[in-house]
Every structure is written in structure tokens, then in C-alpha cells.
Image (cartoon, grey):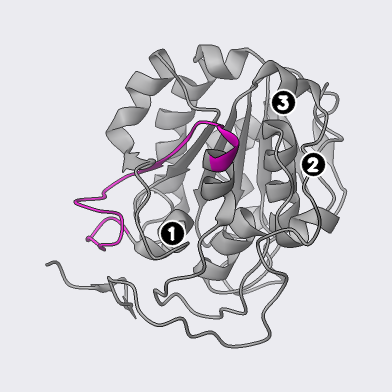
Amino acid sequence: MLPAVLAGCSFPVRPGTVTTTGTPEAASTPSSQPSAPASAEAALGAHVFVIVMENTTYDQALAQPFTRSLADQYALASNYHAVSHPSLPNYLAMTAGSTFGIRDDSYRALPPGGLGAQLTQAGVSWKAYAEGMAGDCLTNTPRYAVKHNPFAFYGGACPANVVAMDQLAGDLAGTTPRLSWLIPDLCHDGHDCPAATADGWLAATVPAILASPAWKAGGVLFITWDEDDGSGDNHVATLVVAPRLTTHTTAVAYDHYSLLATIEDRLGVYRLGLAASATAITDVLAG
């Protein structure tokens, strides 16, 4: 087995006992009978794509040429903030509406649930495409970190929906899942490599999404950063890339719970945890 020490951080590679610090937030299951929101996107079966990058401030991200070009052509959420440090609690917020009180990147088996299980239960197709993953999604490699794959934590198991990144091209040309969640490797997401390298990966990857029939037919791509580099107030860039936009910038205060709320609304499922009270990112999107 490959060593579990990566980029100066040590974390287990297999499920263990759930241990958290801090005060747990709202659970990832709703407290009342769920009802799917009525939306044109949900009715039409529109697709959602998500790319999560790493550890970059708002200004650093927008200083990169391809990222800047997307912000200029599509839509930029200029008042978007991550919710915690380090990486893991932010990923959990984006997929369960809770950080579970976690303040580290260590592996632990969380209760079953989260966005993936929710979509599976609702019959909504989804995949998480993980770059650099070898074997199952619970094993770290020099390129792949379990802490950047939130779907591996819920229930302490690796869903069959988590696949290698090399499946993406075929799915974009063929049957694209309703939710496509992209997990770049530790260099391409900007964690271990400069922001310019991460921007180059986006420049090589995003055009294929925008050329896909799924995106062209009312789809939307969200590109966000899990957290800043620790030097500021967790202000991060978030791009909304869609064929139909009402405006190209928004100063509304959004966060990772807003992103989850938006994803769930567009896929026609109820909101999990703190996403239930979050403001969805709708002011830049048509329809």
C-alpha cells in the first residue's frame, strides 16, 4: 500500500471511529417531510457539473488567465466564502449541509447519507470523477487524496458512482449523469502545484464540458475553491458557467451551503442540513 503521508499531511487510508471536534451542525437528513422543489431545470432533466479546486484566494484565482476568461464570459459570484479550514469540512458542507463539527482532514466513517446517497435514492444519476485514484476511493495515492472526495466518507464505503477521471470523456460524448462531480488530482487542483498549473488543467478540461450536449441543453458548471490559503477571511472565487445567464456577476453573499442548495434545487431533490436555509445561487441563472 502506498504511504498515507502526502504534501506534509498525514491521514489514515481506511475507515475508523468517528471522532470530531467542535460543535456538530445540523444533520444531513431533513427534519421534516422532504419535498422536491418545482423548477424548470429539474423538470427538463438539466445537468449539473461541479469542479472543486484547492487552497487559493479569490484574487489569486482570478489572476489566472483561463479562470479570468471564464469569469468575464460567464458569471462570477464575487462575495462567496468557504465555511471552514482545512479542506474536509468544506467538502462535507458542499455535499451534506454540515461539517459534522470536523476540524481536520482525518478519515472517519460518517453516517450514511449525503448528496450522492440522496440522488441515488431519488433515481437521479450521478458520478464523481477522481483523477489519480487507484483501486478503491478509500486509498490515498501520490496524486489522489481521500480528504478531497466527500463521497468516500458517508457510511464509510466507496460508492460505485466514484470512478476514474478517464471515464469523463466517454460520458460527455454519450450518457452524461445528471450530476458530474470532478475531483482533480493534488497537482491539478492547486493543492501541491502553483495556481498557474491548476489554471492550465481547467483550460484543458472545461472546454470538453462546454462542448457536451448535456451542458448545452440547459446545463450549468460550477467551479469553486474549497478554501483560501489561510491568509484571509476564506473569500474564494466561484464561477457559474451556463449557456443562459441573466447577469455576469453577483455580489450576493453565498457560501458552500448555497452551492449545495443550488445543486439540489436544480436536480429536483430536497435540501440537506444547512442548505435548507441557505440562499441558492439563482440571480445569475436564467430559467
Badge 1 crowding class, 10 Å Cα cut-off, few under 14, some 14 to 19, many 20 or more, is: many
Find the magenta span and give its range.
121-144
Distance in Å between CA atoms under marks 3 and 2:
13 Å
Say which label, 3 or 2, has the lower sequence index.
2
Q: Is residue 177 left or right of residue 62?
A: left
Q: Amino acid at mark 2?
A: Ser
**Which x, y percent locates residue 276?**
80, 55
Quadrant hosting residue 178: top right
Identify the residue at image location x=52%, y=48%. Answer: 117
Q: Which residue is mark 1?
A: 148
Q: Does the image show residue 101?
A: yes
Q: Amino acid at mark 1?
A: His
Dot 1: element: helix
Say which label, 3 or 1, has the lower sequence index.
3
Determine the residue located farthest toward the left in the rendered image. Answer: 1
Quadrant hosting residue 16: bottom left
Q: Is residue 12 left or right of residue 240?
A: left
Q: Which residue is mark 2?
A: 35
- Establish if 108 lies above or below 20: above
Q: Which marked residue is nearer to the observer: mark 1 or mark 2?
A: 2
Q: Which residue is mark 3?
A: 42
Say whether marks 1 and 2 touch (CB < 8 Å).
no
Identify the residue at image location x=70%, y=16%. Answer: 44
Badge 2 crowding class, 10 Å Cα cut-off, few under 14, some 14 to 19, many 20 or more, is: few
